[in-house]
Image: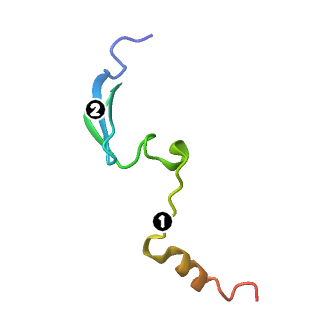
Amino acid sequence: MKADIHPKYKQTSYRCACGAAFEINSTLGGEVKLEICSQCHPQYTGKEKLVDTEGRIERFRKKYKNVGK
């Protein structure tokens, strides 16, 4: 294996919007801010959140109401 071609790993701090924080080794280093993590993601927590932001369902229905008639 060639020497000095691989990036160096540094201690990286990850912080989620839900308040969870953890540290792992990464090539990024420093601090990374996340919007969602495994502690607040519905797939991992089992708590489903139904959020209809900006009326996406209504826009879809309005757009495709005459299709297939």
**SS for tag 2?**
strand
Sequence order check: which comes first, mark 1 or mark 2? 2
Q: Are marks 1 and 2 in contact (CB under 8 Å)?
A: no
Say which quarter of the image contains residue 62.
bottom right
Residue 30 on image: x %, y %: 23, 32
Looking at the image, which residue sits at the far front? 47
- Amino acid type indicated by mark 1: Val
Q: Residues within 10 Å of mark 2 (few under 14, many from 20)?
A: some
**Could you say where residue 9 lies in the image, as x and y percent from the top left?**
32, 21
Residue at 45% across / 10% down in the picture? 1
Q: Residue at x 57, y 78 (%)?
A: 60
Q: Which residue is mark 1?
A: 51
Q: Which is nearer the eye, 45 or 28?
A: 45
Look at the picture and state if 68 lies above or below 32: below
- Residue 8 image offset from top left, x and y in percent: 31, 20
Q: Nearer the viewer, mark 1 or mark 2?
A: 1
Q: Rounded to the nearest whole Å, what is the CA distance between mark 1 and mark 2?
A: 29 Å
In the picture of the structure, the residue carrying the numbered disc 2 is 13
Which amino acid is tagged 2? Ser
- 56 relative position to 33: left or right: right
The location of residue 48, given as percent across then percent down, is 54, 55
Crowding at dot 1, Cα within 10 Å, few <14 / some 14-19 / many 20+, comes out as few
Give the residue displayed 75% in from the left and 84% down from the top.
68
